[in-house]
Every structure is written in C-alpha cells, then in structure tokens.
Image (spheres, grey):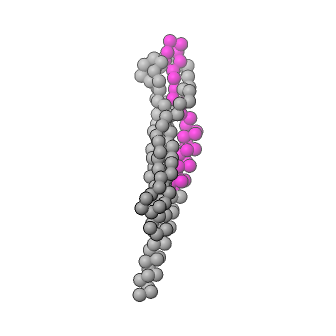
Amino acid sequence: MDPLSAALKIAGSGLEAQSTRLRVVSENIANARSTGDTPGAEPYRRKTVTFGAELDKVSGADLVAVKRLGEDDSNFIEEFDPGNPAADERGYVKMPNVNVLIEMADMREANRTYEANLQTVKQTRDLISSTINLLKASQ
C-alpha cells in the first residue's frame, strides 16, 4: 500500500480513538455529581480509556485502537449532606471519583489530538489531489 493511503488509515484510526475518548470524558463530566439512589449506595464511577497499537495487515501500518474501556478504582469522595436521599446514617454521601478539572484537561488534549489527525487527513487528501493533477498534466 502506498504511504499516502497508509497515512489516511493511521489518521483515521486516531480520529476514531479520540472520538471514543471524547465520548467517555463527556460522560464522566455529565455524571460528576451522580450519587447512588439509596443510603450508602455507590455513585457513578469514572470511566477510563486505554489505547493500544494495532497492525493493519493490508497496509502494514501501526494504527491506534481503543484497547479497553475501564473504570477508575480510586476512592469515592464523601460529602456531608444529611438531606440527600443517598446519605448514610452519619449524613455522608458518596460522590463520584470524577475531578472535573482533570476531565476538562483530558477533553482539551483529546480535542487537540483529534484536530491534528483531521489536519493530517486534509493534507494527505491535498497531496493525493496534487499527485493526480500532476499525472494528468504529464499525459
């Protein structure tokens, strides 16, 4: 396979991986205050994305792929809120282990990586178009 097609495949796999990452980060932010329904129940647990390399047998290119969607096993935060239906007998509510600042930083990084892959696709398409035009002009 030619290098330009391989570049498109690699950038495409990056777009797909970062799209998944953005979806997971958005889900974490949306559930940053989601508690359990009953006293002492576990709240929303932060989701994580693990990437891995995947060899494309057709092109021989190393692609990025979502290897695993997991959960962060860090401790929940306890807040004193005796009026909350999820409060235990001491009046504490288990809150999700989601730090919105970390999620926003992850979102920004994923967005920039997505944009970089998109720019690679655009430039590769331009190179392919230029090559086709050169071939047409030489005939």
> In the image, is residue 30 above or below residue 136?
above
Q: Is residue 92 within the magenta segment?
A: yes
Q: Is residue 99 within the magenta segment?
A: yes
Give the residue drawn at x 51%, y 21%.
Answer: 93
Furthest residue toward top: 89
Give the residue drawn at x 51%, y 43%.
Answer: 50
State the image coordinates of residue 127 (x, y, percent, origin top left).
49, 72
Count of numbered circles in the view? 0
Q: Is residue 15 visible?
A: no
Q: Is residue 6 visible?
A: yes
Which residues lie in the magenta part?
A: 86-115
Q: Quadrant of residue 106?
A: top right
Give the residue drawn at x 58%, y 39%.
Answer: 101
**Frontmost residue, 50 versus 23:** 50
State the image coordinates of residue 137 (x, y, percent, origin top left).
44, 85
Quarter holding the C terminus?
bottom left
> In the image, is residue 135 above or below residue 20?
below
State the image coordinates of residue 76 (x, y, percent, origin top left).
54, 26
Quarter holding the N terminus?
bottom left
State the image coordinates of residue 66 (x, y, percent, origin top left).
46, 47
